Image (cartoon, grey):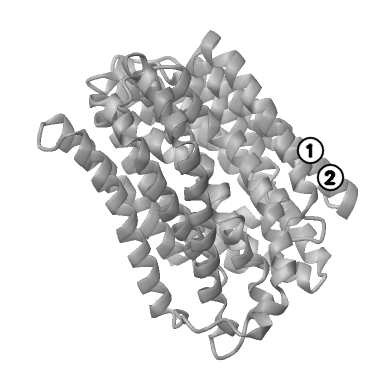
């Protein structure tokens, strides 16, 4: 857990800095022009939704097969060149597919322009944005093979946290129009790709050499793995990205933008999950290659408890303090509209984080094909739920559909990992964490409020932190958390 803790903590700190900027942007910036923000988020959601079809699972090859091709000279048999060629070829096929149905896609959004306020002229921008996301994800995964995730987090998440609010402010004050908001949004991803390539060069791992015969020896195996990964990723995209996409299709841009605010805030809960999962993935792949199931089982349980503690704590703090936070905004009523959707999404995040790295355990094992069978099924359920719940309940309906998908998805994966590999993430400490979190949330909710929103957040937030983190630390429910806190305390205060 050493490298996972170090890189995970550093990456989480970077992402929380970005989340803090995102929170301030949500409170003071995004609600100034929710329609413009909704355009950027709808395009990004469309790109993420179709990302699995655009990369054919190529990005998952970067971790699964890197231990196979790794060499001491750093060339790795031309693996990086192969990944770029394969990803570009897959994207070209995707573009041909989109062009075939383009008239029908454009006609649908053009027919709803007056209702949704989405300008269909910008629809085609999701195509280059999709390719940019293909390269960003592939390069980020490739860099994680060298146990480096902090700088990619800075390049990707933190950089965008500055760019997007800047664009919204420029739009709000009339310096740029909506066209330039979208164009600069795409240009930001070009900058990110350049940063990632330069970082690979700094690591001494930017090698574009011709793929040799060893790469092609594994061609059939990689094609099989990539194909099933594509289907699995498509199902995940349906479960996790479909809500915003369908909000833009079934509702107007205002509510799409407000719902995007709820997603942005709820993603702060998932920051530790992304950090720990990113650094854990290559370790799990390497452990499977060595058949070291004991290491995977230990990692599974340790990360589950750490992530659950983080998720319960963050959702409790957000739930208690969000109404007061909205009072600080000039358009707090816009933010407050997203409150219940935020809480519903937060429950899904808790389940997702508590079940930890179950997806990677399946994905990098010999049983990776099984992901497809229930992921695609859950994708269909999520489509049906969004179609049923969004027209009836709006943003809350989209949140309920996503949360139900996350709960069902992770319940199936957890059961399968336990049945197939005899690995289970939960213990009695899991129940104690949930009970302590529930008590802390109830007490925090019952605490009286004053007329000062800032004072309310300070004293209620501090009370909840002490009520939750105090017992968790005192009873040593997570030895890894205690060790990390003690080590950092000694490092800071000597």
Residue at mark 1 to residue at mark 2: CA–CA distance? 6 Å
User: Where residue 65 appears, x then y in whole percent?
Assistant: 67, 71
Quadrant into which the C terminus falls? bottom left
User: Where residue 43 appears, x then y in whole percent?
Assistant: 39, 37
Specify the quadrant of the image occupied by residue 293: bottom right
Q: Which residue is mark 2?
A: 416
Residue at x 34%, y 39% (from the top left corner): 22
Mark 1 in CB contact with mark 2 (< 8 angstroms): yes
Numbered disc total: 2
Specify the quadrant of the image occupied by residue 322: top left
Quadrant into which the N terminus falls? bottom right
**Which of the two residues, 224 or 367, is positioned nearer the viewer here?**
224
Label 2 CA crowd tier, 10 Å (few <14, some 14–19, many 20+):
some
Label 1 CA crowd tier, 10 Å (few <14, some 14–19, many 20+):
some
Residue 245 visible in the snapshot: yes
**Which of the two residues, 243 or 260, is positioned nearer the viewer here?**
243
Residue at the extreme bottom:
73
Residue 478 visible in the snapshot: no
User: Residue 480 got which mark?
Assistant: none
User: Where residue 344 appears, x then y in whole percent?
Assistant: 56, 23
| Disc 1 secondary structure class | helix
Residue at x 87%, y 54% (from the top left corner): 421
**Which of the two residues, 166 or 424, is positioned nearer the viewer here?**
166
User: Residue 412 got which mark?
Assistant: 1
User: Where residue 478 appears, x then y in whole percent?
Assistant: 67, 50
| Disc 2 secondary structure class | helix
Residue at x 38%, y 18% (from the top left corner): 111
Specify the quadrant of the image occupied by residue 313: top right
């Amino acid at each position: 857990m050493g490298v996972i803790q170090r890189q995970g903590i550093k990456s989480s700190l970077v992402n929380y800095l970005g989340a803090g900027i995102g929170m301030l942007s949500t409170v003071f910036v995004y609600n100034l022009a929710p329609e413009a923000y909704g355009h950027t988020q709808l395009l990004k959601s469309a790109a993420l939704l179709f990302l699995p079809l655009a990369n054919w699972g190529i990005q998952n090859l970067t971790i699964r097969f890197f231990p196979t091709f790794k060499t001491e000279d750093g060339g790795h048999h031309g693996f990086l060149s192969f990944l770029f060629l394969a990803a570009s070829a897959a994207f070209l096929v995707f573009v041909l597919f989109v062009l075939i149905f383009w008239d029908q896609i454009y006609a649908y959004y053009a027919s709803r322009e007056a209702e949704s306020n989405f300008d269909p002229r910008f629809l085609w921008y999701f195509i280059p944005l999709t390719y940019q996301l293909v390269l960003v994800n592939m390069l980020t995964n490739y860099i994680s093979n060298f146990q480096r995730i902090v700088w990619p987090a800075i390049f990707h998440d933190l950089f965008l946290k500055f760019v997007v609010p800047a664009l919204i402010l420029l739009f709000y004050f009339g310096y740029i129009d909506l066209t330039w908001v979208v164009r600069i949004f795409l240009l930001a991803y070009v900058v990110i790709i350049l940063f990632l390539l330069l970082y690979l060069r700094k690591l001494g791992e930017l090698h574009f050499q011709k793929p040799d015969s060893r790469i092609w020896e594994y061609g059939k195996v990689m094609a099989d793995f990539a194909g099933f990964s594509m289907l699995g990723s498509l199902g995940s995209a349906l479960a996790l990205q479909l809500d915003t996409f369908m909000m833009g299709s079934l509702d107007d841009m205002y509510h799409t933008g407000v719902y995007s605010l709820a997603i942005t805030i709820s993603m702060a809960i998932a920051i530790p999950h992304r950090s720990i999962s990113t650094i854990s993935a290559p370790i799990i792949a390497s452990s499977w290659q060595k058949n070291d199931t004991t290491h995977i089982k230990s990692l599974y349980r340790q990360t589950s408890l750490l992530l659950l503690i983080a998720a319960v704590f963050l959702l409790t703090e957000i739930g208690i303090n969000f109404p007061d936070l909205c009072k600080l905004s000039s358009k707090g009523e816009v933010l407050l509209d997203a409150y219940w959707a935020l809480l519903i999404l937060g429950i899904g995040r808790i389940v997702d984080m508590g079940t930890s790295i179950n997806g990677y355990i399946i994905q990098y094992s010999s049983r990776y094909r099984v992901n497809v069978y229930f992921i695609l099924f859950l994708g269909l359920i999520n489509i049906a739920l969004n179609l049923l719940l969004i027209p009836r309940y709006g943003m809350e309906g989209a949140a309920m559909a996503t949360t139900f998908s996350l709960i069902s998805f992770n319940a199936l994966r957890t059961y399968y990992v336990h049945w197939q590999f005899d690995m289970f993430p939960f213990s009695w400490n899991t129940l104690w964490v949930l009970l302590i979190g529930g008590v802390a949330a109830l007490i925090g909710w019952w605490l009286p409020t004053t007329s000062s929103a800032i004072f309310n957040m300070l004293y209620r937030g501090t009370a909840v932190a002490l009520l939750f983190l105090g017992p968790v630390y005192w009873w040593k429910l997570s030895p890894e958390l205690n060790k990390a806190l003690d080590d950092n305390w000694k490092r800071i205060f000597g």
